Image: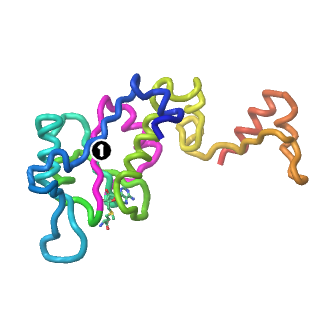
Amino acid sequence: MTEQRPLAAVLGSELDLRLLGYRDYTPLRNGQVDDEPYGGGSGMLLRVDVVAAALDSVYGGVPSHPVVALTPQGRQLTQEVVEELAFEERLTLLSSRFEGFDARIVEHLCSDAVSIGPYVLSGGELPAMVLVDAVARRLPGALAEGSGERESFSAELGGGLEHPHYTRPPEFRGWGVPEVLLSGDHARIESWRREHVR
Ligand SMILES: C[S@@+](CC[C@H](N)C(=O)[O-])C[C@H]1O[C@@H](n2cnc3c(N)ncnc32)[C@H](O)[C@@H]1O
């Protein structure tokens, strides 16, 4: 993921990524980071003291920049949320596994909680990568000039979906390309594109 554009284009300049593991900071023996839920039930929960110890070690406490828990219970990730987070100087993303977070982590150690969609994944690693990718492509230099301004869900398209795109060949198995796109008439092409924003 980090070796490909657009992430590779901003890594080390606009974007620094640090990957940290709770086990490296846990105050508990044998690298323990999770525990059984009070009240019973299946699964293990990430412990609040472990996450607090990690934040203490890395930042000297709860940092002043946003700390975002990745959880199905968070607010849904939309392009608007991406734009908001891309504006931040720094972000800390917390992910969990198994049954999830002790609720006190989200309540007291995080300032935000984000879900990447209404479905459950096995861990927060993929949600964190989704968020990093979506934020990274909004950073200066990630994309060719202007190409990120007029994408699906952008303000420029009124939050709508981008028009269809076509490339060579102009005909394949009888499937053609709209004639206007081959015309070279930029005004007509522009108006066709505007008409086909959904
Ligand atoms: C198996 S899930 C926990 C599901 C949780 N018990 C529930 O029912 O909501 C384990 C972890 O994966 C991550 N995760 C799973 N689905 C996610 C989603 N849709 N958005 C963000 N994070 C998610 C979170 O970090 C979560 O704590």
Q: Position of residue 52 (x, y in %)?
A: 13, 47
Quick check: 158 above or below 190? below
Q: Please tell me which residue lies in front, 81 or 101.
A: 101
- Inspect this view and state whether residue 137 appears: no
- Residue at the location (76% across, 42% down)? 166
Mark 1 within 8 Å of ligand 1, using the beta carbon: no
Q: Residues within 10 Å of mark 1 (few under 14, many from 20)?
A: many
State the residue position of label 1: 93
Left or right: 64 in relation to 143: left
Where's ligand 1: which quadrant? Answer: bottom left
Q: Position of residue 133 (x, y in %)?
A: 45, 40
- Residue at the location (79% across, 28% down)? 187
Rendered image coloring scheme: rainbow
Q: Position of residue 67 (x, y in %)?
A: 25, 42
Q: Residue furthest front?
A: 30
Residue 101 part of the magenta segment: no
Q: Element type at marker 1?
A: strand
- Residue at the location (71% across, 45% down)? 164
Q: Residue furthest right?
A: 174
Q: Type of residue at label 1?
A: Leu
- Inspect this view and state whether residue 185 appears: yes
Q: Quadrant of residue 24?
A: top left
Quick check: 97 above or below 6? below
Q: Which residues are magenta?
A: 74-97
Left or right: 122 in relation to 63: right
